[in-house]
């Protein structure tokens, strides 16, 4: 895939080992993914904050590759300071790269809206502080988080060492105590979970969104490329 239809630029934490292969697996023929990295080892609020200072530098470098859209591929990194910060991040990246930009937190919101998900079961790999911030972000966007579970993992390489089976089991346990959710969100671009989406949707009868699914869906529709290659119910949604 040499980008003859579109090139997606991806800004990711340096320790992320999941976003590039998952996005590359979820794009159609003729779309390529090109990454630049910001320094991050531990997924904590202070380290994510420091990492964000490098986002525009990475975006500018991706612009040298003549990408068509840049995705800021970090969920908590794009919601750390709530609504407003996410949109500002997209605008700053767009200006630096010279092309449209999407940030994972806003991509998730757009995906949840596209699937009309208001009552969310949330699974994260994060420490409690970041899981709490994510709940607050989703609820500030008008959603209700009816069940939540965080795995309390701090080292990003440890998050990347999790598996889709881990995600499946975490969601299954989470839904046992969930109060009638209408959607499932598995958070973190470094949590390998994209390949579990369709099985979870079949087994649980609910739409499932992961951070990488939302990000690649949003990037594809931004450049006008069909999204059928994205796993799950999200694939058929072209909402703007």
Image (cartoon, rainbow, N blue to C red):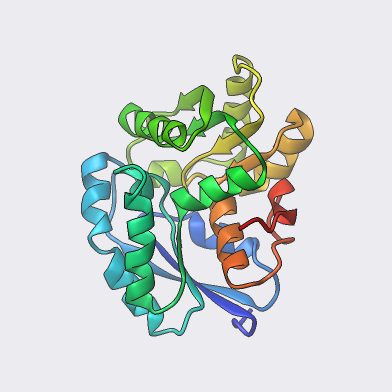
Q: Is residue 50 left or right of residue 223?
A: left
The quadrant in which residue 134 appears is top left
What's the residue at 21%, 53% (across, down)?
50
From this view, report whether residue 96 is shown above or below residue 123: below
The quadrant in which residue 196 appears is top right
Count of picture labels: 0
> Residue 175: where, in percent of width, then height?
63, 21
> Residue 89: where, in percent of width, then height?
34, 59
Task: Indicate the quadrant containing the N terminus: top left, top right, bottom left or bottom right.
Answer: bottom right
Q: Is residue 79 left or right of residue 233?
A: left
> Residue 240: where, in percent of width, then height?
61, 58
Is residue 178 visible in the rendered image? The answer is yes
From this view, report whether residue 131 is shown above or below residue 89: above
What's the residue at 42%, 47% (across, down)?
75
From this view, report whether residue 6 is shown above or below residue 28: below
What's the residue at 59%, 78% (across, down)?
6
What's the residue at 32%, 70% (across, down)?
58
> Residue 199: where, in percent of width, then height?
74, 39
The quadrant in which residue 217 appears is bottom right
Q: Nearer the viewer, residue 221 or 173?
A: 221
Q: Is residue 8 left or right of residue 91?
A: right
Q: Is residue 101 left or right of residue 177?
A: left
Q: Nearer the viewer, residue 151 or 105?
A: 105
Q: Nearer the viewer, residue 191 or 234?
A: 234
Is residue 13 visible in the rendered image? The answer is no
């Amino acid at each position: 895939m040499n980008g003859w239809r579109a090139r997606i630029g991806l800004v990711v934490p340096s320790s992320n080992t999941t976003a590039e292969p998952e996005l590359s697996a979820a794009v159609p023929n003729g779309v390529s993914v090109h990454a630049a990295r910001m320094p991050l080892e531990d997924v904590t609020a202070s380290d994510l904050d420091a990492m964000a200072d490098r986002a525009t530098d990475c975006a500018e470098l991706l612009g040298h590759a003549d990408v068509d859209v840049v995705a800021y591929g970090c969920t908590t990194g794009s919601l750390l300071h709530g609504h407003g910060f996410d949109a500002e991040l997209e605008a700053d990246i767009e200006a630096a790269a010279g092309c449209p930009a999407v940030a994972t937190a806003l991509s998730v919101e757009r995906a949840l809206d596209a699937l009309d998900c208001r009552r969310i079961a949330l699974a994260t790999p994060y420490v409690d502080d970041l899981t709490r911030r994510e709940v607050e972000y989703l609820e500030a966007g008008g959603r209700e988080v009816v069940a939540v579970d965080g795995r309390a993992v701090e080292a990003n390489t440890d998050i990347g060492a999790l598996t889709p089976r881990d995600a499946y089991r975490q969601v299954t346990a989470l839904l046992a105590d969930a109060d009638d959710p209408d959607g499932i969100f598995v958070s973190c671009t470094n949590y390998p979970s994209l390949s579990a989406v369709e099985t979870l949707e079949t087994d649980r009868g609910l739409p499932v969104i992961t951070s990488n699914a939302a990000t690649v869906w949003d990037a594809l529709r931004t450049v006008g490329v069909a999204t059928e290659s994205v796993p799950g119910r999200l694939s058929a949604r072209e909402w703007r």
